[in-house]
Image (cartoon, helix red, strand yellow):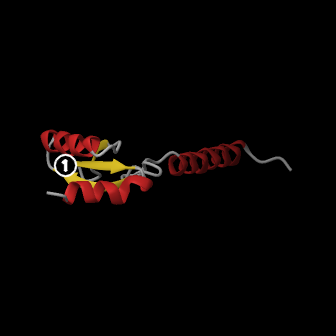
Amino acid sequence: MDLPAPYLLLVALLVIGVLGLVLRWAFATDEKRDYGLLREVAKVPSRTAARFVEDRLRGAGIRATTVPSADGDGLRILVFPADEKTAIAALLDD
């Protein structure tokens, strides 16, 4: 079955359009970044506050990571799940 040239062009454009939509969906970036196993233990407004929290956690023997928050307002302090309770206790301890 031979289709006329305008129909072949229309089918080709349709296939390219569908492929473009699939690729856009597949490679879309999510607003909230996933940091794997890491858990948030604090959210701070500035780099200075983040350094203070990291130093306090480091003093308790806990490794911490600082990342920007999803809303762009401040920074998040992340730790591994095994250290989460200890990190919260270290931060709440006066």
Residue 84's image quarter? bottom left
> In this view, which residue lies farthest toward the right?
1
Residue at x-position 52% and y-position 51%: 25
Q: Position of residue 10 (x, y in %)?
A: 63, 48
Residue at x-position 21% and y-position 45%: 56
Q: Position of residue 73 (x, y in %)?
A: 18, 51
Q: Is residue 69 above or below residue 47?
A: below
Q: Nearer the viewer, residue 2 or 92?
A: 92
Q: Position of residue 82 (x, y in %)?
A: 44, 55
Task: Provide the secondary structure element on which disc 1 rests.
Answer: loop
Which kind of residue does numbered mark 1 sit on? Gly
Q: Which residue is mark 1?
A: 74
User: In the rendered view, does 22 fall on the left or right side of 8?
Assistant: left
Q: Nearer the viewer, residue 81 or 22?
A: 81
Residue 54's image quarter? top left
Position of the C terminus by quadrant: bottom left
Residue at x-position 18% and y-position 51%: 44
